[in-house]
Image: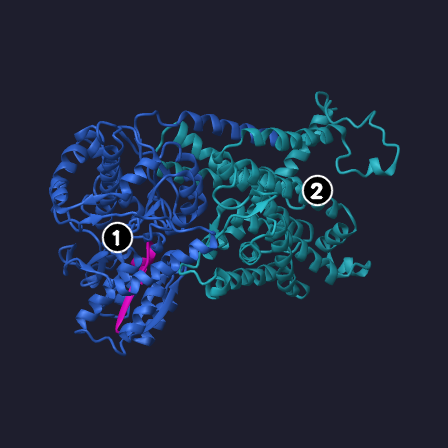
Amino acid sequence: MKIKQFGAALVAATILATSVPVAADLTFPMLSYRTGPYGPNGAEFADGYADYFTLLNERDGGIGGAKILTPECETAYNTAKGVECYESTKEGALIYQPLSTGITYQLIPKVTADDIPMHTMGYGRTSAANGKVFSHVFNYPANYWDGASVIIKHISDEEKGDLKGKKISLVYHNSAYGKEPIRTLEELAKKHGYKLTLIPVDHPGQEQKSQWLQLRRDRPDYIIMYGWGVMNQVAIKEATNIRFDMSKFIGIWWSGSENDVLPAGDKANGYKAVTFHGVGDDYPIFEELKKYVKDTGKAAGDGSNLGTALYNRGMYAAMLAAEAAANAQKIHNTKDLTGAQMRDGMESLKIDQDRMKALGLEGFGPEISVTCANHGGPGLGAIQQWDAKAKKWSLITDFVESDRSVIDPLIAEDSAAYAKENSMKERDCK
Amino acid sequence: MFYRESGDFKTNYADDQQSFPIKLDRYAVWVLLAFAFFVVPFFINDYWEKSVLVPFLVWSMAALGLNILTGYCGQVSLGTGGFMAVGAYSCYKLMIAFPGLNIFFVVILAGIITAIVGIAFGLPSLRIKGFYLAVATLASQFFLIWMFNKIPWFYNYSSSGMITAPERTMFGIAISGPSAPSWATYLFCLTLVTIFAFIARNLTRGRIGRAWKSIHDMDIAAEIIGIPPLQAKLSAFAVSSFYIGMSGAMLFGVYLGSAEPGEAFGIDKSFLVLFMVIIGGLGSILGSFLGAAFLILVPVLMKNIMVGAFGWPADLAAHLELLFIGALIMFFLVVEPHGLAQLWRMTKEKLRLWPFPH
């Protein structure tokens, strides 16, 4: 029996040994998920991520002449599988983008010990923006607390600057992810004088009758949602059932994809979500993606996702990783990179609008500049609104800044707590 | 031919009552243990540690715990995930409160705290049985997870509700935290599991174990022949929760390093452990290990074969894996309803007579 089990494991080991990538390639492991209740969302992001690297390989021959590899590992949004995926791909890995807050928390100490950077764009541990404590974790260009603050700013604009006595409800995924904005929203409530109620939805969120019954009774003025996967669709449908005004229902960027609003049909018209990058496929890069990736049959998935909100985000994440890799190659004057060199590339990353234009993404996202102390980037967000007739998202505001006076002290406080728990000292940043 | 008892004479009671009376069995166990303790630590790497061996050991411990309660004492429990969460959160609070404490004692103390909680939730078992008890333990699962979500003291008021294990040591070597060496965490788990598997084996063969087994077979009859059901049932709950609590502490502290209640200790984990016990074999120590190996190692192996060797897409492999595991579970339950341990027992019987079955 035991022998059988050891034999089985032995087979696994030999197989594993053969799949290690050869040197001189740049390896960007993908901890993606295409199965489970979060699969439809995870697949779009993963397609965008993979397709951008395929484009670089096909058009430019990789980054700085080095080919890119993207070994994929299915996590199913499950933390234990995430750890397994990390351990099986970390040999020669340059960067991790796990697209799961739970897995991010798991990996923060591990990547720091293994000297591999991790980029959690718009998710993960928000206080990782403090580069003095989190040396290997980056969450530019925006984080959960920026998102919450931008949403409150938008509501305040709608209400002509007066939120006194307004009732705002937060419907959230009852996990590390959904709980992240609570502190920020509470602080903002003190500042603006609105009343916040918290409504948790347990994983996976297919059943939300009792939550929406409560919302129907409470009659909040606005609902904010931090949901993911099937939970978003169900919440938007339930909101239409209680005839809630969709223009007063605002999601975080993870609750703002086509998958979430399409099942509710025309009734979802007017639903809003905050975002930190452009929407649609009206950018020159999509011509290139069609030419080099989709039409040659090299697209990940079936190639039908080009231009969807999550595809764009995956592509944006890949673009930022590729730019950081190019930056690292320049700094260290080498073609082959290590995780440590990649980290240096990320820490001194600067992307201005000229560069965005050269990439075919003019106006797609804000200018980014990362420093040793600030791993969080500019923290800008815009509001997008769903047009159910045209089946399209459109930006209805400019990219605005979050309320730094509230968020910065919270980041300092939370990162200090982490440093204390792990008996760490802050790095010196010159 | 194999496993022949003839010629293996026992001349005193101690020899006759030892854990492995058959010589070949005994040698096999010693060789296996020697291999696990003295050979594996020299070759182990991070992947083997974090994806194969440590998860296997941690879940074996949980399966051992549930097997004591369900397999030996016959009390069905669906609260395993909740009790593992109790172990994990006590481990976390102890780590934070006593930074200098040896992690070995942290895990044992976490087990003891879980045992106390287990006794409290075991009280209804004196009045209700069977499916109704399963529902009562299910309630404990939901209550405990809800509690760890709701009360911020348990997760030290962190904004996300996640708990993260700081670095804690044993003899100056890090066991938890990211810089813990693979061989150290592996040996730590292996030592705990070996010690407590040995204790479980002997507990179940002794007076207490016989009391559990008689309650399992028929509790009224057991009471009539003089076994107090209160003591027997509550001791089963206590010992079982102790094991499950330790496995929760190891899962959080040594294996994962951070956890949130809903995801790491959800209802699916309760079912996972129950499946391990059923597939491995109810009322068998070996069965606990076989069940854990089946449900933890086979998926990893299949993933490595399909994605690593054949190069299939990761999502296709994930779907096929679910399909195969489901089919294999059904296959084993049809072929041998008493679990993998019974399959092994039958093989042993056959090997004794081989090659002349008549």
The residue at the point 23 percent across, 37 percent down is: A327
Reading the image, the residue beneath label 1 is A259
In three-dimensional space, the C-alpha distance between marks 2 and 1, rounded to whole angstroms, equals 53 Å
The residue at the point 20 percent across, 66 percent down is: A154
Q: Residues within 10 Å of mark 1 (few under 14, many from 20)?
A: some
Nearer to me, A18 or A370: A370
The shade of chain B is cyan
Q: Chain coloured blue: which letter?
A: A
Which SS class for mark 2?
A: helix
Q: Total number of numbered labels?
A: 2
- Residue A188 location in percent, x, y? 30, 69
Say which amino acid is labelled 1: Asn
Q: Is residue B337 visible?
A: no
Mark 1 falls within which chain? A
Say which amino acid is labelled 2: Phe
Nearer to me, A137 or A302: A137
Mark 2 or 1, closer to the camera: 2
Q: Is residue B251 left or right of residue B207?
A: left
- Residue B77 location in percent, x, y? 60, 56
Q: Which residues, given as a range, are shown in magenta?
A: A221-235
Q: Is residue B274 left or right of residue B7?
A: left
Q: Residues within 10 Å of mark 2 (few under 14, many from 20)?
A: few
Nearer to me, A418 or A187: A418
Query: In the image as oriented, which residue stretches furthest toward the top?
Result: B355
Are discs 2 and 1 less than 8 Å apart at CB?
no
Which SS class for mark 1?
A: helix
Q: Is residue B287 visible?
A: yes
Reading the image, the residue beneath label 2 is B198
Query: In the image as oriented, which residue stretches furthest toward the right?
Result: B11
- Residue B6 location in percent, x, y? 82, 26
Nearer to me, A326 or A83: A326
A97 vs B162: above or below: above
